[in-house]
Structure formats: structure tokens, C-alpha cells
Image (cartoon, rainbow, N blue to C red):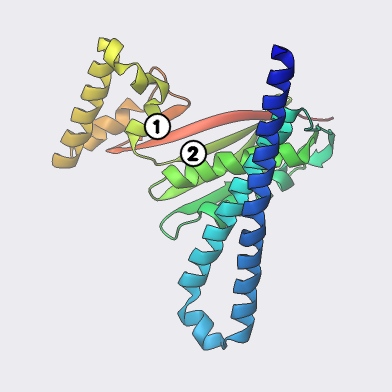
Amino acid sequence: MSNDSDERSHFLRTEFLERVAHELRGPAGVTLGALDELEHSLGAEVVEQNRTLFAMARRGARRVLRTADRLTRTAQLEGGTAHVTRLPADLRTLVRQAVQDAELIEGRSSVKVTLRLPEEPCASEVDGTWLGIALMELVAQAIRCARRDVEVSVQTRGNQLRLVVGDDRIAVIHAGSALRGAARSPRLRAELAAGKRRRSRARRYPRDRDAAQRRGRERVPGDTGLRERTGATERFRGAVILSGLQT
């Protein structure tokens, strides 16, 4: 009886997620279509004057569509209906598309995204749909957290392909799980306090920035990636192994 109840509950949950996704996707798609029609019907001068407003409206509708897609994928994973199909692909194309999609959703005029890809093809067998979704989410997260710039690159290391995403987010965000354990870690509290004092001093005494630059790179317990210190600015870099190269 308990198993039947659990299966029923699981079925209702996935059905609910799919229904909510459908209800979100419809209005968002209609909104994007209406914006396109409105742009075509207005004169070029009026459109140019309101370009920022059109961009804001489209970005908002695309975020709703992304939420709907997330709900659909969650329902597929929980319901066991998600299918992974590995096919030959050039990972440069997937990364380029992921960056474009992330900028459409999270792009800000104050944040510049730089993409660096190898000149040679990066051939591998992957599920382009699921990998593309994951890459887009990684880049979008970097854009959300960045203050001014984001760097995305694909690097080869041996027979592995690595996606490296870097941004100049505020340093305290990097601590991640370490911050959650700060109350239990006197060493971590001391390190975070010392970093705060160094940044404050670098702002007040510019000559100290040279010393900060000489310190180079540091790894903080609990970081999800590597922080690079340059003067009073700290960068975050996260690397993800994409796949093995096909030779």
C-alpha cells in the first residue's frame, strides 16, 4: 500500500511540474511574438528610442521560458523519461551557442563576455541538448555574479576538453559552502577577516596593491574554483571537464 502511495505521489508531482511548465511557456511565447509584431509595426525611429525597453521585455519573457524548461527537465528526470543520446559534435559550437543563449537571458550592458575557442575542431560524442543546457546555466550564473567582465574558454589538456569560466564577482560569494561552516571554523573566519582587511588597505593605500599582486593566486577552503587576486580585485575561475577528445 505504501509503494502504491509513493508511486501516486511521484506521478502527481511530475504531472504538476509539467503542467506548470506548460502554463508558463504559452504566455511567454505569446509575449515574445507580440513584441516582434510590435517592433515591425512601429517606425524605426520609435523602435530605436525604445530599444532598451524592448530588450528588457524580451529578457524577462526568456527567463520565464527558461523556468518552464527547468521544470520540464526536472519532471523528465524525476519521471525517468529523460533520454541521453550521444552523438558526434564539435564542442566549440555548443559552447558558442551556450554563451549566446546566456547573454540573451542574463546579459547586462555593464558586463562584457569574452569567448575564446581553439582554432582546431573539438570533436567528441556528447548529448548536445543536455550538455548545452548545462553550459548555458554555468555561463548565465557567471554573468549574474560578475561586476564587469566574464571570460569563457575551451582548453585542451591531454585528451580532455575543459570549459573554463571566469568572472570578477565580489569575493565573499566565492566561499560557497565554506561560508555556511564559518561559525564552526575559526581558521576560516580568520582568513576571511584577513582578506577583508587586505582589500580595505589596498583601497586606502594604492602602493600596497603591488604587494597584493605579488601574492598571486590563493585557494580558500570551500571554494568551488580558483580565485586570482589582482590588487583589490579578485577573480573567480571554475573549470569543468566537458569530454574526451576524439582522435
- In the rendered image, which quarter is residue 167 located in? top left
Amino acid beneath label 1: Glu
Q: Is residue 19 left or right of residue 207?
A: right
Front-most of residues 40 and 175: 40
Q: Image quadrant of residue 226?
A: top left
Q: Residue at x 21, y 23 (%)?
A: 193
Image point 49% across, 42% down: which residue?
142
Q: Amino acid at mark 2?
A: Gly
147 and 198: which is toward the camera = 147
Compared with 199, 145 (above or below) is below
Residue 86 placement (x, y as % from top left): 83, 33
Q: On the image, numbered disc 2 is attached to which residue?
A: 166
Residue 29 in the image: above or below residue 162: below
Q: Percent position (x, y) of residue 45?
A: 51, 87
Q: Which mark is residue 228?
A: 1
- Distance between the alpha carbons at the discs numbered 1 and 2: 10 Å
Q: Quadrant of residue 70?
A: top right
Which element carries disc 2, helix, strand or loop? strand
Q: Are marks 1 and 2 in contact (CB under 8 Å)?
A: yes
Quick check: 20 left or right of 11?
Answer: left
Q: Residue at x 71, y 45 (%)?
A: 94
Q: Which image quarter holds the C terminus? A: top right
Using residue 99 as the reference point, say whether residue 120 is left or right of it.
right
Is residue 212 left or right of 224 when viewed as pictured? Answer: left
**Which residue is nearer to you in this view: 90 or 119?**
90
